[in-house]
Image: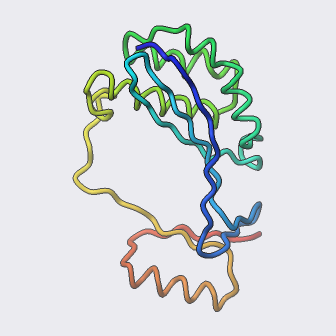
Amino acid sequence: MKISKISVRRLQIPLRLRFEQSNSRAAYSDSTIVEINTGNNLIGYGESCPRPYVTGEDFVTVSRDIHDVADLLKQTAFKSIEDIRECVTVVLPRHMGPAAVCAVELALLDAWSKETGTPMAAALGATLPARVQYAGVVPLRSPEGTAQLMALMRHFAFKDLKLKIDA
């Protein structure tokens, strides 16, 4: 698989309610989207959610880092899933942070899956679970606000919850 073009863009989606935890607050989701075009006119998509308080990265640094390695990626012939693995575990971490590597890795895997016609889970040697389990998240709120969200979580029958607390 050869890469012909790499694009990076920002995706911000307003949240229905402000999300707060001890080290940050947000009124919108903030993701970095990477598109990798292959020589066969297929597009692989990847996403990461850079957080300065987690990895020190933000959209600007992730975008810059990906643009800085674009030529290196375009010069690489990915002949196997192992080539992708080596790229994202050995080569890319020397040039960029984990959020940038994440977005590129997902885009490479998506493109590879499309190029080879292999479902990504099969390409990675994984089996899909029969059921996906998801946890509800309850951000920092007033006691009344927390009670309202907990009632919603009960209504939607979440079996697992993540409660954000402050020290």
Instruction: Measuring from the top left, give residue 106's x and y in whole percent.
Output: 48, 33
Instruction: Residue 134: name its quadrant.
Output: bottom left
Q: Check the image and report above or below for 86 versus 149.
A: above
Residue at 68% in and 75% down: 140
Does 123 sit left or right of 111 as displayed?
left
Instruction: Residue 118: name its quadrant.
Output: top left
Q: Check the image and report above or below for 100 versus 87.
A: below
Residue at the limit of the structure toward the front, as seen here: 41
Question: In front here: 67 or 155?
Answer: 67
Q: Check the image and report above or below for 50 versus 25.
A: above
Question: In front here: 144 or 18?
Answer: 18
The quarter of the picture where the C terminus appears is: bottom right
Instruction: Measuring from the top left, give residue 36's x and y in whole percent.
Output: 50, 27
Residue at 67% in and 44% down: 50
The quarter of the picture where the N terminus appears is: top left
Residue at the limit of the structure toward the bottom, as seen here: 144
Residue at 62% in and 35% down: 8
Q: Number of labelled discs?
A: 0
Colour setup of the view: rainbow
Question: In front here: 69 or 162?
Answer: 69
Residue at 37% in and 13% down: 80
Instruction: Measuring from the top left, give residue 55's x and y in whole percent.
Output: 72, 41
Instruction: Measuring from the top left, give residue 6's x and y in whole percent.
Output: 57, 26
Does 114 sit left or right of 15 as displayed?
left
Does 79 sit left or right of 92 as displayed?
left
Instruction: Residue 164: name its quadrant.
Output: bottom right
